[in-house]
Image: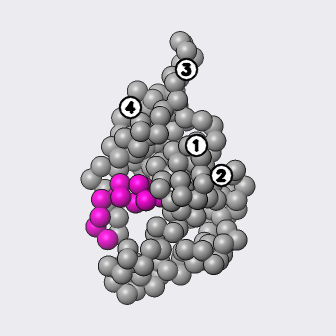
């Protein structure tokens, strides 16, 4: 897990840290996921970049783009929830990251409901699903995994009210 000065909650002494720039968020996400690969064996940072770019292409704002870079960090234990809580990020960015963090044993319906209830989260999840369901990414997986993931992503799009979008 990436260790940063923000690993401990702000004690309230001194002025708050200035918000992280998008470049700093990207660097933090890349460092946190360093050495991690996706199901196809590609560097995980490629997925994060693709999701951030997908958010940008869909008209997302800087808070959503920051959340895109960090969308898997807590779920993957790359960064702690404590780090996120103390990080110099907007409340909205933190809320989107938390909305996109799956909880152990959580039904897809509950996960989708949380995303839909969090302003700005659906757009980030749509970009995530689009990259996850990219035929070029899926093509390198074995048939059973490809079929399972294709069904999983289609179901989530349906739960988010976007069954026709990849």
The residue at which mark 1 appears reads as: 63
Task: In this rendered view, identify the residue nearer to me: 89 or 22.
Answer: 22
Q: Nearer the viewer, mark 4 or mark 1?
A: 1
SS at mark 4? loop
Q: As displayed, is residue 8 above or below residue 81?
A: above
Q: Quadrant of residue 23?
A: top left
Query: Which sits earlier in the primary sequence, circle 1 or circle 2?
Result: 1
Range shown magenta: 40-51
Q: Nearer the viewer, mark 3 or mark 4?
A: 3
Label 2 near label 1: C-beta < 8 Å?
A: yes
Q: Main secondary structure of the magenta part?
A: helix
Label 3 and label 4: CA atoms lie apart by 16 Å
Q: Residue at x 40, y 86 (%)?
A: 144
Query: Which sits earlier in the primary sequence, circle 2 or circle 3?
Result: 3
SS at mark 1? helix
- Tell me residue 26's x, y (percent): 41, 43
Query: Which sits earlier in the primary sequence, circle 1 or circle 3?
Result: 3
Q: Is residue 141 left or right of residue 120?
A: left
- Tell me residue 107's x, y (percent): 62, 68
> What kind of colouring is applied to the model shown?
one colour
The residue at which mark 3 appears reads as: 16
Label 1 and label 2: CA atoms lie apart by 9 Å
Q: Residues within 10 Å of mark 4 (few under 14, many from 20)?
A: few
């Amino acid at each position: 897990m990436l260790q940063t000065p923000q690993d401990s909650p702000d004690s309230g002494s001194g002025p708050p840290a200035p918000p992280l720039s998008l470049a700093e968020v990207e660097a933090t996400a890349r460092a946190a996921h360093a050495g991690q690969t996706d199901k196809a064996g590609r560097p995980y940072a490629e997925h994060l970049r693709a999701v951030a770019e997908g958010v940008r292409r869909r008209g997302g704002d800087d808070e959503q783009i920051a959340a895109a870079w960090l969308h898997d960090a807590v779920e993957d234990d790359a960064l702690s929830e404590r780090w996120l809580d103390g990080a110099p990020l907007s409340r909205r960015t933190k809320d989107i990251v938390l909305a996109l963090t799956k909880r152990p044993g959580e039904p897809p319906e509950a996960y989708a409901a949380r995303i839909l209830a969090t302003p700005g989260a659906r757009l980030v999840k749509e970009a995530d699903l689009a990259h996850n369901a990219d035929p070029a990414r899926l093509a390198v997986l074995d048939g059973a995994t490809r079929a399972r993931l294709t069904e999983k992503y289609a179901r989530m799009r349906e739960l988010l009210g976007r069954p026709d979008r990849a």
